[in-house]
Amino acid sequence: MNNPAPSTRPPAIQIDDLTVAYNYKPVLWDIDLTIPEGVLMAIVGPNGAGKSTLIKSILGIIKPIAGSVQVFGKPYKKQVDKVAYVPQKGSVDWDFPTVALDVVMMGTYGGLGWIKRPGQKEKKRALEALEKVGMLSFRDRQISQLSGGQQQRIFLARALVQDAAIYLMDEPFQGVDATTERAIVNILKELRQSGKTLVVVHHDLQTVPEYFDWVTFLNVKSIASGPIRDIFNDDNLTKTYGINYKVATKG
């Protein structure tokens, strides 16, 4: 039996020689990273490693001083409709006077253009996304009145309604309860099973093997990246965090 021909489809994200600096101090240094399509990947590393900066560089929010980022073989600005972003909860103004349904419907704006307003079709998609994250009964609740876990679910629903090919998430489990964390993990795994690519900044090393199938170790430089079974080991943990680490999983 002949082996199948290798795929010529570009990876979901290709990062080459990426360097980002703040006040001449490198935050990311000469990053080379290939993120295949259809993986659920954690980005892990110590505080100040550049994890959030890497996400923002992919999105073009932060401009690198060198290097390039391509999304399915093209610059991000040409692939905006293929990428959804869930920011850190702490970076959002939760006092802004709006209700949960309106926040989720914001996720439909990118496909409408500047003139059209969201209609019943978009509202239906937003309600379905709210139901998926278990927040349908809170659709008319002011976001400032929601708990931290509920707020995070709302922002996940806003990303889901975009039906993107790639989801970039900056610490989606930060400050959420165990029930919300499990619900989010289940949704992420469903998205991966449907062929989506997910890149998640994550800090709990114990849950990495349980939640993810791919991992990137980052500490200003890219230490290692690949499947959990090959990459998530004591050696790479020690190289990344600078102290002797032992792999410990929840059980």
Image (cartoon, grey):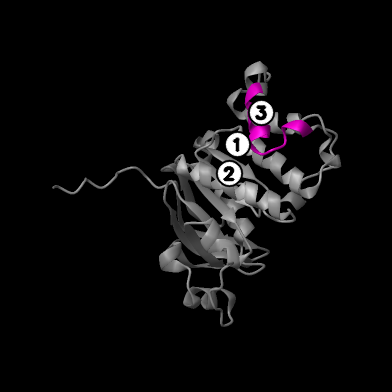
122 horizontally vs 70: left or right: right
Mark 3 vs mark 2, CA separation in Å: 16 Å
Mark 1 vs mark 3, CA separation in Å: 9 Å
Numbered disc total: 3
Residue at (55%, 40%) from the top-left corner?
A: 83
> Where is mark 2, residue-wise?
187
Q: Secondary structure at mark 2?
A: helix
Q: Are marks 3 and 2 in contact (CB under 8 Å)?
A: no
Residue at (47%, 58%) from the top-left corner?
A: 214
Of marks 1 and 3, which one's residue comes earlier in the chain?
Answer: 3
Q: Which residue type does callout 2 highlight?
A: Ile
The boundaries of the magenta stretch are 124-138
> Where is mark 3, residue-wise?
126
Q: Are marks 1 and 3 in contact (CB under 8 Å)?
A: no
Residue sitting farthest toward the front:
251
Of marks 1 and 2, which one's residue comes earlier in the chain?
Answer: 1
Visible residue check, residue 59: no
Q: Residue 109 in the image: x percent, y percent?
A: 65, 27
Q: Are marks 1 and 2 in contact (CB under 8 Å)?
A: yes
Q: Residue 203 in the image: x percent, y percent?
A: 63, 63
Q: Dot 1, crowdedness within 10 Å: few (<14), some or many (≥20)?
A: many
Residue at (46%, 43%) from the top-left corner?
A: 193
Q: Residue 190 in the image: x percent, y percent?
A: 52, 43
Visible residue check, residue 127: yes
Q: Nearer the viewer, mark 3 or mark 2?
A: 2
Which corner quadrant of the image does residue 211 belong to? bottom right
Q: Which residue type does callout 1 highlight?
A: Leu
> Where is mark 1, residue-wise?
160
Q: Of helix, strand and loop, which mostly describes the magenta segment?
A: helix
